[in-house]
Image (cartoon, grey):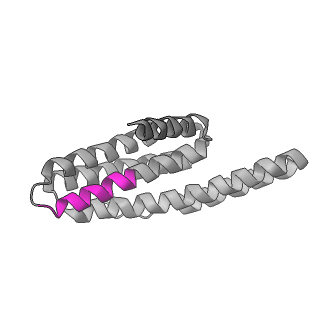
Amino acid sequence: MAITDGYQKYKQVEINTAPQNRLVVMLYDGAIKFLEEACAYMDKKHGTEQVHNNIVKAQEIIYELLSSLNYEAGEIANRLASIYTYMNQKLTEGNISKTKPPVLEVIKYLKELKEAWVVVEEKVSKGNVDSNANKSSNKNENNEINKESKEKSEIKLNIKG
C-alpha cells in the first residue's frame, strides 16, 4: 500500500509541475494506453465491460484535449478540434461494435499527434535556453515551432459522410 501511495504522490507532483506541452504528451500517452487495453480485452471472451470502460476513459481524455484548445492560436486549433471530434466518433463506433479497426485507427492518430507534440516540447525546451541568450531569435524559433507543429498535426482523415 505504501508503494502505491508513494507512486500516486510522485505522479501528482509530476503532473502539477509539468509544463503545458508535457501535459499534452502525458494525455496522449494515457489515451493510447487505455485504447491498447481496450483492444487487449476485445480478444477476451468476457471483456466487454473492460473494453467499454477503457474506451470511455480515452474519450474523456480526448474531450479534455478538445476543451483545452486555445482558439486564439489560429487554424491549428480548428484542425485539432476536427481531429479530436473525428477520433471520438470512431471510438463511439468501436465501443458500440466492440471491434478493433476504429480503435486502432484512433491509436494511430494519437501516436502521430504525440510525436508532433514531443518535437514541439523539445524545441520549446531548447527555445527557453536560447531565450535567455537572445530574445529576438526566440521569436523566429517560435514561428518555426508553430509551422512544424501545424505541418505534423495535419492528419489526413477520410471522413465518410
Tell whether 120 sits left or right of 135. Answer: left
Residue range in magenta is: 31-44
Q: Is residue 41 magenta?
A: yes
Q: Residue 25 placed where, x, y %?
A: 52, 50
Q: Pick the residue in front: 44 or 54.
A: 44
Tell whether 37 sits left or right of 128. Answer: left
Q: Residue 83 placed where, x, y %?
A: 41, 53
Tell whether 87 sits left or right of 16. Answer: left
Does residue 5 show up?
yes
| Vertical order, 142 against 152 (above or below) | above
| Vertical order, 85 against 154 (above or below) | above
At x 50% / y 48%, what residue is drawn? Answer: 26
At x 49% / y 58%, what residue is drawn? Answer: 113
Q: Pick the residue in front: 52 or 40.
A: 40
Quarter holding residue 3: top left
At x 23% / y 44%, what residue is drawn? Answer: 53
Q: Is residue 130 magenta?
A: no
| Vertical order, 156 against 7 (above or below) | below
In this view, the residue farthest toward the right is 133
